[in-house]
Amino acid sequence: MIFFHPNNKQFHLSNEKISYIFKVMENGELCNLYYGKAMKDRENFDHLQSYYERPLTPNSASLSMLSLQYTRQEYPSYGTGDFRFPAFRILQEKGSLISNFVYESHQIFSGKKDILPLPSTYVEKEQEAETIEITLFDQVTQTRLLLSYTIFAYLPVITRHAVFTQVGAATISLKNAMSLCLDLPDMEWEMLHFAGTWGRERYLKKRSLEVGIQSISSMRGSSSAEHNPSFLIKRPHTTEFAGEAIGFSFVYSGSFLGQIEVSPYEETRILLGIHPENFDWQLKQGESFTTPEGILVYSDNGLNAMSQTFHQLFRTHLNRSQWRDKPRPILLNNWEATEMTFDEELILKIAAKAKEAGAELFVLDDGWFGTRNDDTQGLGDWFVNTEKLPSGIDGLSKKITDMGIAFGLWIEPEMINKNSKLYETHPDWLMVDPAREPSPSRHQFILDYSRPEVVDGIYQMLEKVISGSDISYIKWDMNRYTTETYSNHTPAEEQGKVLHRYVLGVYDLYTRLTARFPHILFESCSSGGARFDPGMLSFAPQTWCSDNSDAVDRYRIQYGTSYFYPISSIGAHVSAVPNHQTGRISPLATRANVAYYGAFGYELDLNHLTDKEFEEVKAQIAFYKKSREVFQFGTFYRLLSPFENHGSAAWISVSEDKSIAYAGYYQTLERVNHGSIRLYLAGLCPKKQYHVTSYSYDHIHYGDELMNAGLVIDRRILSRLGGDFTSLLFEIKEI
Ligand code: GLA
């Protein structure tokens, strides 16, 4: 998979789908020759390098013909005649930021190494990937730079990261260290990214690239609901089913920058990595810094193919838990039913009804610990509130598991309220500059996870609660961003390390808890989906997608989320109407038809349903038990975008052997007396005959007919169902 041509010092990473070609130039620096659809290997690809003589061009000091401003580089330095943003900057003791790394050596090997303590993608067998590590050296700073590239054998995936090691006696300071840089020869691309805020995460945003800089980022200490650390570029004509696209994703849960710079000569540079703001990493002699992993996925078959690659990569080469390949339990969470106002009797009543409906897991959300009766108090006190729950979590979990339903618990381990026992004992555990008042958010503050003793203290408390009870699921929440980055126990010259160390502290706690309790299914959460990123997915195979549980808003949010994240990772629940966030009343069937495409559950008290509604819920759960593997692990295609199509959406999940599929169609507002809808399905076997059923629909079709002529949906059916916010779920079963 990785060819090396020693005569021309060229490297060609290739599999059946992609080629990535770069070389060592005559001056020892690296330049990119090609990235895209697979090409046959050859001895020399030199002709792909562009040399330009342009007015006022600075040339490389060591090679007069070369201008780095017009060279597609692998990991550009500052101070080489390239005026674009560099991939890194090193501040030296004498104040210089100039560097120049030249090739020293390389090694190619089968498989892929971990970059612990950072999460990263992995392979289980050596033949699933090949890796090349290139070592470069800067003579003046005496710094070694290792650039690592892994190509997956069966997927159009390349992963990258960089390692800086200070060899010389002088201390250096990394001001910026991106995980990847990709220089492309033209700007005929559109950028698609996923932006939002609380309650409307990952709405699809699109813009054409322009000369200048366009970027997405988070400076909030976590990946954020505002921008997601996964984005893509596509050719203007690329659709869901055809054309070129390149997806970028960052295996990291902290602040990040994804930046696209287009030069006046219409060449494109893409950088992805830790946000340089608030980052400053000193390296003394012998010390190293490893960047998190950046991922590149290429598709020449449209956006669905790109998404399917990410789904497969994240499902089978990222998460490391025992739950990775297991169908997810149907859960009922009490948050929207009770918030923090409950007692043991009420919880047992809700859990018993969930069991009666057929649910497999009951989750007790916020409010069970300390004096947590509202959100002004209790965070940090990870011991049970016996006034509310006299039998403790141990007793309650036993009562619930004795009913025949598993028990799960909510925690928010990175946070503290000032009104808590933890604050009385450890006021110094807050991340705060003691000379200033920190800004509260939801009345809470951040614990200084850059300090191992803080992480350890919280681990001890949580270990006690979890080990003493019958717990098989944990929802790990995180309900505010970092505002004042400062660690009171860290020397001045290391303050630039605090935010990254915080993220490492979170990963450390995740590592310890998942190792200590390997049977537990973790679901990450951050005020809904504000930390839905590959770093979290490495530990927790699913993430609560949004606090907005309104069915109509949810198909937008889940649609956006599906561009990168697998359906099995999308926590999705049916909740009560009028919806708590929007006040909208949508049919129970639509709420379920949306939530099926995820880690499915309920978020309401089933005791409040009418008998008819309860029977409907029982039927939904029984249906999902038979079908969930198709929804969660099938091949997923987006069919109609809710960001167009008058807000209506459609998608389909197809089993691996194409013998069964489920397609969902969702109508936002009724459109009176309009033509019928032609829904073109995807992913089926053209020659197979399928029995297609839905509400009042029962026909037999060949796969090619369903894909080429489309499934015709009569609008009158949707009117009969109630018009606005109605939906249809089609079962498509091979005969
Ligand atoms: C966040 C979560 C919710 C719920 C509450 C509890 O908002 O996203 O699901 O757990 O916290 O306080």
Image (spheres, rainbow, N blue to C red):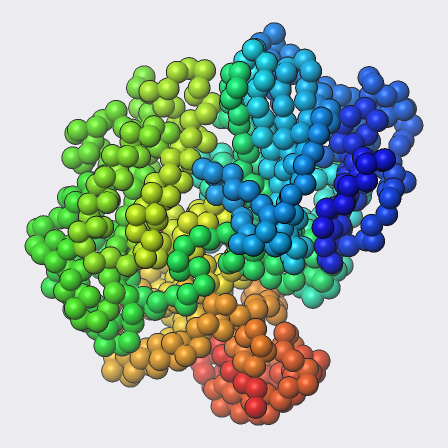
Residue that protrudes farthest toward the top in the picture: 94
User: Position of 321 compared to 362: left or right?
Assistant: right
Comparing 340 with 320, the one in front is: 320
Comparing 420 with 307, the one in front is: 307
Residue 257 visible here: no
> From what the image shows, is residue 346 above or below residue 699?
above
Q: Residue at x 32, y 56 (%)?
A: 520
User: Position of 592 compared to 684: left or right?
Assistant: left
Comparing 161 with 607, the one in front is: 161
> From what the image shows, is residue 350 above or below residue 382?
below
User: Residue 237 placed where, x, y %?
Assistant: 76, 59
Number of marks in picture: 0
User: Position of 692 compared to 16: left or right?
Assistant: left
User: Residue 682 placed where, x, y %?
Assistant: 64, 74
User: Residue 579 placed where, x, y %?
Assistant: 35, 64
User: Position of 58 compared to 393: left or right?
Assistant: right
Quarter holding residue 53: top right
Q: Residue at x 57, y 86 (%)?
A: 734
Residue 352 visible here: yes
Q: Residue at x 22, y 50 (%)?
A: 466
